[in-house]
Amino acid sequence: MKEYKYVITDPEGIHARPAGLLVKAAKEFTSDIKIAKDDKVMSCKAIFGVMGLGAKKGDEVTLTFEGADENEACEAISKFMQENL
């Protein structure tokens, strides 16, 4: 299992457009990809889960990757987070 922590820098937090793009990117991998904030843990492959976190600018989220392509998924999703959120 791989883990990646990221502090949201987008002034609007995780809103609809980047959440949709994150879900699309996560669905390209077979690994189980979760996103967590505080005590909430959601699947990165479900738009309502990602939006349900209510992550705002300055919040730290933790992404976990578990599966056959976890290394590739971690690399791609961490790059996505830095570029979009």
Image (spheres, rainbow, N blue to C red):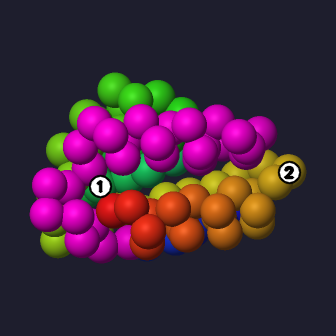
Secondary element type, mark 1: strand
Report the quarter where the C terminus lies.
bottom left
Q: Is residue 84 above or below residue 5?
A: above
Left or right: 31 as drawn, with respect to 3: right
- Residue topped by disc 1: 37
Q: In this rendering, does residue 22 appear at all?
A: yes
Residue 68, given in percent of the width and then of the height, sits at 85, 51
Q: Is residue 39 above or below residue 23?
A: below
Residue 51, given in percent of the width and then of the height, sits at 28, 36
Q: Residue at x 39, y 61 (%)?
A: 84
Left or right: 62 as drawn, with respect to 16: right
> Farthest right residue?
68
Of 48 and 41, nearer the camera is: 48
> Which of the marked residues, 2 or 1, is nearer the chain's N terminus?
1
Looking at the rendered structure, the kind of residue marked 1 is: Lys
What residue range appears in magenta? 6-33
Of 50 and 9, nearer the camera is: 9
Q: Mark 1, residues whose alpha carbon is within 10 Å: few (<14), some, or many (≥20)? A: some
Residue 68 is labelled as 2
Left or right: 35 as drawn, with respect to 15: right
Quadrant of the image occupied by residue 26: top right
Report the quarter where the N terminus lies.
bottom right
Residue 75, given in percent of the width and then of the height, sits at 66, 69
Q: Residue at x 77, y 39 (%)?
A: 30
